[in-house]
């Protein structure tokens, strides 16, 4: 019995040993697998670490490229101080010179300044002079101041034509974007046109002197008459600037302006005295600004009293400028 119990006890002991050994082998296997699992875990950062190094290399390369581009841009842009803004006077004179250069590139603009005054002077002197004043020599003393007024009033329309041309070509917006006194394109164009008016006036006076015109007021009277004509022409130009910004084409500016200029100049005392007109027409024509201007110019050139006529021209010029100049400047700033 004892032997049998001992055998059973030995079997249990060996079984327990075998079970413990197998458990220990399983635990070892699990441990080894755990070690493999744990060892496999740290191997991932090695891959991520290579990607991170590549990312860092890309970032450093990008930073180098940006710094290179920044260096290139510093080479493109000027490092000197920004120049001061052009003064109002400088901008105006520059754009006035530009207005005169247009004559060089568009010689047709000189046609109305030179050829037209000569044609009107010759035609009215030799065709109508004998019928209106007895002889051409007598009529030319009356005609030259009137032709001077008519010619300058006619060519004031070119201020609006030039402005409309700049708008159509896109120069209008370019001028608005420049760092300068904003009204300078308009004022400069007007200043350049005053030179054109002066040239036209000198052409008429030279032709008149050749044909026998003799101003009794001398040089002072002629100069004062010319200044008075330029004053009125500058005030009238503001109206054509408004037309230039409202109509679509330069040809429309010309057509529209002459609808007003033709009756304004011919319904005056430029060619004949007021006494030759019907009474109802005299009542209208004698208050015309062109009639005041022609009378004042004629009186100044011949050394006669011209106080009321000069005052009328000054009042008309001031009223036209005060009304239409602010409108033209405001439209210029708002125009797109």
Image (spheres, helix red, strand yellow):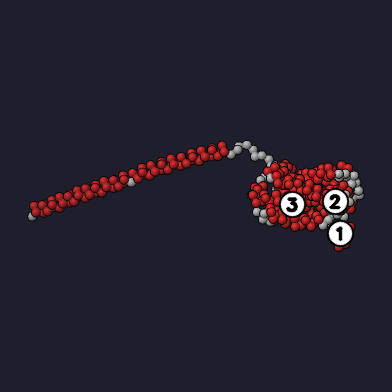
- Choose top left, top right, bottom left or bottom right for residue 258: bottom right
Q: What element carries label 2?
A: helix
**Between discs 2 and 3, the one toward the N terminus:** 2
Q: Which of marks 2 and 3 is in front?
A: 2
Q: Name the disc covering residue 129, or none.
A: 2
Please tell me how crowded label 3 is: few (under 14), some (14-19), or many (20+) other residues with Cα within 10 Å. many
| Residue 72 in the image: above or below residue 302 | above
The one nearer the camera, 281 or 333, is: 281
Q: Residue at 16% x, 51% y: name it.
A: 15
- The quadrant of the rendering that contains the N terminus is bottom left
- Residue 253: x, y in percent? 71, 54
- Residue 243: x, y in percent? 72, 55
Q: Residue at 33% x, 46% y: name it.
A: 41
Please tell me how crowded label 2 is: few (under 14), some (14-19), or many (20+) other residues with Cα within 10 Å. many
- Residue 125: x, y in percent? 83, 49
- The quadrant of the rendering that contains the C terminus is bottom right
Q: Name the disc covering residue 277, or none.
A: 1
Q: Name the disc covering residue 157, or none.
A: 3
- Residue 55: x, y in percent? 42, 43
Q: Are marks 2 and 3 in contact (CB under 8 Å)?
A: no
Left or right: 34 as drawn, with respect to 308: left
């Amino acid at each position: 019995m004892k032997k049998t119990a001992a055998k059973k006890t030995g079997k249990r002991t060996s079984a327990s040993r075998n079970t413990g050994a197998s458990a220990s082998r399983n635990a070892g296997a699990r441990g080894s697998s755990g070690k493999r699992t744990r060892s496999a875990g740290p191997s991932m950062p090695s891959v991520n670490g290579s990607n991170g190094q590549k990312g860092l290399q890309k970032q450093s390369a990008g930073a180098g490229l940006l710094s290179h581009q920044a260096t290139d841009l510093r080479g493109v842009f000027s490092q000197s101080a920004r120049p001061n803004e052009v003064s109002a006077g400088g901008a105006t004179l520059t754009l006035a010179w530009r207005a005169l250069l247009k004559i060089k590139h568009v010689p047709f603009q000189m046609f109305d300044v030179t050829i037209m005054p000569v044609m009107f002077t010759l035609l009215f002197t030799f065709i109508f002079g004998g019928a209106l004043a007895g002889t051409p020599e007598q009529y030319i003393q009356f005609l030259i101041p009137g032709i001077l007024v008519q010619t300058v009033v006619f060519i004031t329309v070119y201020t609006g034509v030039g402005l409309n041309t700049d708008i159509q070509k896109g120069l209008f917006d370019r001028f608005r974007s420049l760092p300068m006194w904003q009204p300078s394109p308009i004022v400069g164009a007007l200043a350049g046109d005053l030179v054109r008016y002066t040239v036209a006036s000198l052409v008429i006076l030279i032709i008149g002197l050749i044909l026998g015109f003799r101003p009794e007021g001398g040089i002072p009277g002629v100069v004062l008459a010319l200044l008075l004509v330029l004053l009125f022409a500058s005030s009238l130009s503001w109206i054509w600037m408004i037309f230039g910004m409202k109509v679509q084409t330069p040809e429309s500016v010309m057509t529209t302006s002459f609808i007003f200029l033709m009756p304004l100049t011919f319904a005056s005392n430029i060619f004949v005295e007021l006494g030759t007109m019907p009474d109802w027409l005299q009542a209208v024509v004698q208050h015309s600004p062109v009639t005041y201007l022609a009378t004042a110019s004629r009186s100044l050139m011949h050394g006669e009293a011209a106080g009321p006529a000069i005052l009328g021209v000054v009042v008309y010029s001031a009223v036209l400028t005060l009304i239409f100049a602010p409108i033209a400047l405001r439209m210029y700033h708002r125009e797109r």
